[in-house]
């Protein structure tokens, strides 16, 4: 039965590691031992050489001292004699102890014998002479020279033996190093053989089966979906082959399921495309790179130059309208940045002329909340804007024509009221005056509504803090309000309408609580809020309160239904957006976002 690959390779790898460790240990320990032995021999040889030189120096000092004493009889010459004779035994013992071999040791003893003879026969007798007795005995002097020459000769023999020992130690070290290197070479060769064995084993157990699996995958990639791995080789390879075959079988079944799912998705896509093509609203979607993914029938029909590929291709078509100040990016680009765009009015320029479109856009997110695309819906409001223009023109004419009779009626009503005493007559005249006043407010709102759409903008610095304070002292200001670069008349009408609504819808018996605040917007503009604690706006009415002539609270509250519609037009004319929301704790919050170019002074948070 074949052994597992891991066990086989592990065993051979262990042998390889053992051989490598043996080579390393032998090289380290053998080299260290040879070095220590050689260093010890060199140290002994050096110590012997220094001791031999010291012996010669000591005996030379003795010889010099006795010779001077013999010639002069002066005891001062005996100082070198005494120093030399005292140090000589120490130098001799050091030489004997450090001698590297028996031959050197024998020669040191011969040197000592020659020195002792010279000392006994010559040096000591001369040193024993009484001071002041100079003289030279020819026989003793000649004998002393012969004996001291013998000492010198023995000393030279010791030095020669030391040099021979040094040459022998060096030769022995080299021979031992050669033998050690040869042994290490054999061990290294053994490690190479073990490595080759591991390579052959790995090739047989791993590379060959893996090559067969690679060929299998190549056949699969070439279209041979029936190809399967052969169940041969080591147990691990057989298990891998069996698992691969099981995965291939499962992938075949998965492929069938994917094909079926793709057919279902294609059918679903075709169904959704038909649904989107049926609705009379333009729908565009894009991915995170800005590439257009889908356009429905209405969106395609608005194109005269083919299907756009990216958001950049839309820039030449989706442009701000002639009467709409909107320098912001395309709604799809804003949606990809995470913004939700509501009711951005644009001009769609095509071969058939200009069409007005209101676009909404929002980001598409995955389960983790990451933006994966964006969708835009747009509907044609060209006819509506034309009707509104006609209505505005009619309102302007009607307003101008009606102001004169209203003024006349109001004047006569005041005259009648001064002379009446009957309560019933006074009540009738009062009702006439109220009707005239309501008609005047309606005419004023109609004119403001028309002006907010068509009158040219005349930007100038507008200090919101001063403006709000001049409208009503009951309004609170939170923080610092900015200075806007906007049309002063329109901005005043905007805040007059918002503040008057907030005050008007305060519940009876409660003090008004209206607060205006500002904060920097993420886009670089300003975010304004007008919050109140009034009766609030029903949830189902929040999306329609900016529609012309729409009144969320019809009974008990006077109004023409144009106030918030005028606000919406003023904000849109300045490139911003306005929305209404519930105020936590009761009441309503109006949110206004204006672009950076309308901010004349930085807003602090």
Image: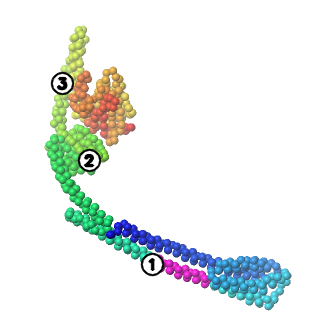
Residue 105 higher or lower than 21, as above or below: below
- Closer-to-camera residue (271/487): 271
Say which element carries label 2. strand
Which marked residue is nearer to the observer: mark 2 or mark 1?
1
Query: In the rendered structure, which segment of residues is drawn in magenta?
Result: 162-187
Quadrant in the rendering for residue 563: top left
Label 1: which residue?
A: 186
Q: Position of residue 92 (x, y in %)?
A: 70, 80
Mark 1 is surrounded, within 10 Å at the Cα level, by few (under 14), some (14 to 19) or many (20 or more) other residues, namely few
Q: Position of residue 358 (x, y in %)?
A: 21, 39
- Residue for point 35% across, 35% down: 518
Q: Position of residue 444 (x, y in %)?
A: 23, 26
Label 2: which residue?
A: 373
Q: Position of residue 37 (x, y in %)?
A: 57, 76
Quadrant in the rendering for residue 601: top left
Residue 170 within the magenta-colored segment of the rendering? yes
Label 3: which residue?
A: 401
- Closer-to-camera residue (206/470): 206
What's the distance in space between the residues labelled 2 and 3, CA to CA?
53 Å
Judge from the rendering whether residue 507 lies leftward or rightward of residue 193; answer left or right. left
What's the distance in space between the residues labelled 2 and 1, CA to CA?
70 Å
Judge from the rendering whether residue 420 lies leftward or rightward of residue 195; answer left or right. left
In the picture as drawn, the residue positioned furthest to the front comes out as 1
């Amino acid at each position: 039965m074949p052994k597992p690959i891991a066990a086989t390779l592990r065993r051979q790898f262990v042998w390889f590691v053992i051989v490598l460790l043996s080579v390393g240990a032998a090289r380290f320990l053998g080299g260290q031992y040879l070095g220590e032995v050689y260093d010890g021999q060199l140290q002994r040889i050096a110590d012997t050489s220094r001791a031999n030189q010291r012996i010669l120096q000591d005996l030379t000092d003795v010889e010099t001292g006795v010779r001077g004493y013999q010639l002069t009889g002066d005891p001062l010459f005996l100082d070198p004699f005494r120093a030399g004779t005292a140090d000589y035994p120490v130098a001799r013992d050091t030489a004997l102890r450090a001698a590297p071999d028996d031959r050197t040791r024998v020669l040191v003893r011969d040197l000592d014998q020659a020195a002792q003879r010279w000392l006994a026969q010559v040096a000591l007798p001369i040193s024993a002479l009484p001071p002041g007795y100079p003289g030279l005995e020819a026989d003793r002097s000649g004998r002393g020279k012969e004996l001291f020459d013998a000492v010198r000769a023995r000393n030279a023999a010791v030095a020669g033996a030391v040099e021979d020992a040094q040459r022998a130690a060096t030769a022995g070290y080299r021979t031992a190093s050669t033998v050690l290197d040869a042994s290490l070479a054999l061990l290294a060769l053994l490690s190479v053989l073990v490595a080759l064995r591991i390579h052959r084993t790995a090739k047989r157990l791993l590379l060959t089966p893996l090559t067969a699996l690679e060929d299998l995958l190549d056949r699969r990639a070439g279209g041979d979906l029936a190809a399967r791995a052969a169940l041969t080789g080591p147990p691990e390879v057989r298990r891998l082959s069996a698992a691969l075959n099981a995965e291939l079988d499962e992938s075949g079944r998965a492929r069938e399921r994917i094909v079926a799912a793709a057919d279902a998705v294609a059918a679903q896509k075709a169904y959704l495309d038909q649904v989107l093509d049926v609705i009379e609203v333009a729908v565009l979607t894009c991915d995170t790179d800005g590439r257009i993914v889908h356009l429905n029938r209405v969106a395609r029909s608005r194109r005269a130059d083919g299907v756009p590929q990216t958001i950049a291709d839309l820039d030449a078509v989706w442009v701000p309208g002639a009467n709409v100040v909107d320098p912001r990016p395309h709604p799809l680009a804003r949606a990809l940045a995470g913004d939700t765009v509501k009711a951005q009015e644009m001009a769609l320029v095509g071969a058939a002329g200009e069409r007005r479109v209101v676009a909404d856009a929002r980001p598409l997110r995955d389960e983790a909340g990451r933006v994966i695309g964006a969708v835009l819906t747009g509907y044609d409001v060209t006819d509506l804007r034309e009707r509104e223009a006609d209505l505005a023109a009619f309102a302007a004419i009607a307003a101008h024509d009606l102001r004169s009779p209203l003024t006349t009626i109001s004047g006569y009503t005041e005259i009648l009221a001064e002379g009446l005493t009957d309560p019933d007559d006074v009540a009738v005249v009062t009702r006439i005056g109220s009707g005239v006043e309501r008609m005047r407010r309606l005419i004023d709102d109609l004119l403001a509504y028309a002006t907010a759409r068509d009158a040219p903008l005349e930007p100038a610095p507008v200090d919101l803090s001063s403006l709000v304070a001049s409208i009503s002292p009951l309004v609170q200001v939170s923080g610092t309000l900015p200075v806007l670069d906007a049309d002063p008349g329109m901005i005043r009408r905007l805040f007059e309408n918002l503040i008057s609504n907030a005050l008007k819808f305060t519940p009876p018996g409660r003090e008004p609580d209206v607060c205006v605040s500002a904060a920097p917007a993420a886009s670089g503009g300003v975010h304004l809020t007008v919050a109140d604690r009034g009766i609030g706006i029903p949830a189902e009415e929040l999306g329609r309160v900016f529609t012309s002539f729409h009144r969320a609270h019809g009974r008990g509250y006077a109004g023409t239904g144009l106030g918030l519609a005028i606000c919406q037009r003023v904000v849109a004319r300045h490139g911003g957006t306005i929305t209404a929301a519930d105020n936590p704790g009761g009441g309503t919050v109006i949110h206004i976002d204006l672009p950076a170019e309308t901010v004349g002074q930085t807003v602090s948070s």
